[in-house]
Amino acid sequence: MNILLDSKKLNKHYNLGKKNRIKVLKDVNLEVLRGEFVTIMGPSGSGKSTLLYNLSGMDQVSSGRVIFNGKELSSLSEKSLSALRLKDMGFIFQQIHLLNNLSIQDNITLSGYLCGRKNRKDIVKRAQMLMEMTGIESLAQNDITQASGGQLQRVGICRALINDPEIIFGDEPTGALDSQSSYEIMELLRRINHAGTTVFLVTHDPKVASRSDRVLYMVDGQVVSEKRICRYMGGKKEAISREKDLSQWLMDTQNVSLVMEKKKCLKTSI
């Protein structure tokens, strides 16, 4: 078993005052295998995005350990951690955060220049290959204002892949897109994953989650349920079947979670 990402008793809390502490993550133990496609689901406020930020080193854990590719993130200096994120991790967000004063191609190549692994000619060549793969090569010299939301999300994917990372982290990458653009982005991520890149997404959308190998469901800062699915190979018939199966599992999981929450509230009130 080749583990790429591993968290052990991961906790995250925020102090809002001397006696006011909010616990967002509670003893999360999680393993992500190299080449796996994992999605995190759960109600708003359950800790999904916080988990992603802590696993990627974008936020500092309160206690516990996060080990990425054999390195414990808390043992790294801020400079080393930033270099690790730049070289070995790619990020795709709902809000793409592109630079207005740069062309689409320059937005993609910037992270490559900062990484310093290759010369500029090779970085531009890779960017052009990625733009061709995602169908936006004709927009290379356009400003970001001259592209649709779906096209800009493809720019975000190219930017995330420019340094050939070990893993792609995505926080609701299809949340602001229409259904067709969402489908196209998920097909791209599926192809990227099948080519060997690990993918770890936060999503509310069962259609998105049904494309993954494994779905984790979070409630109140804890992973309370997990569903493993065979690898999605594509096709409308398979997609519909997977979505139906996952929706039923989500319904069952949510019902169990509600019962557990009611029991917890009852014990608290006694």
Image (tube, rainbow, N blue to C red):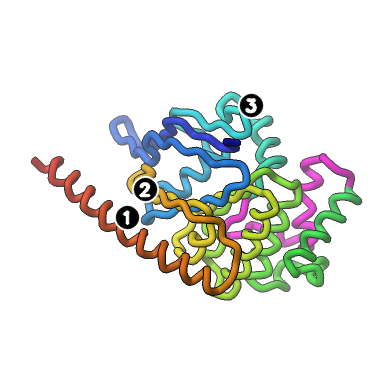
Residue matched to label 2: 225
Q: State the residue in front, 15 or 93.
A: 93
Q: Does residue 12 show up? A: no
For the point 47% across and 38% down, which residue is it?
A: 30
Q: Residue 15: percent from the left, percent from the top?
A: 37, 35
For marks 1 and 3 on the same chain, the one whose residue lies earlier in the sequence: 3
Q: State the residue in front, 240 or 93.
A: 240
Residue matched to label 1: 253
For the point 79% across and 65% down, which residue is it?
A: 132
Magenta span of residues: 91-119
For label 2, the SS is strand
Q: CA distance from mark 2 to mark 3?
A: 34 Å
Q: Which mark is residue 66?
A: none
Residue matched to label 3: 77
Relative to 219, is 141 on the left or the right? right
For label 1, the SS is helix
| Amino acid bearing label 1 | Thr
Work out which quarter of the rendered image holds the N terminus and state it. Answer: top right
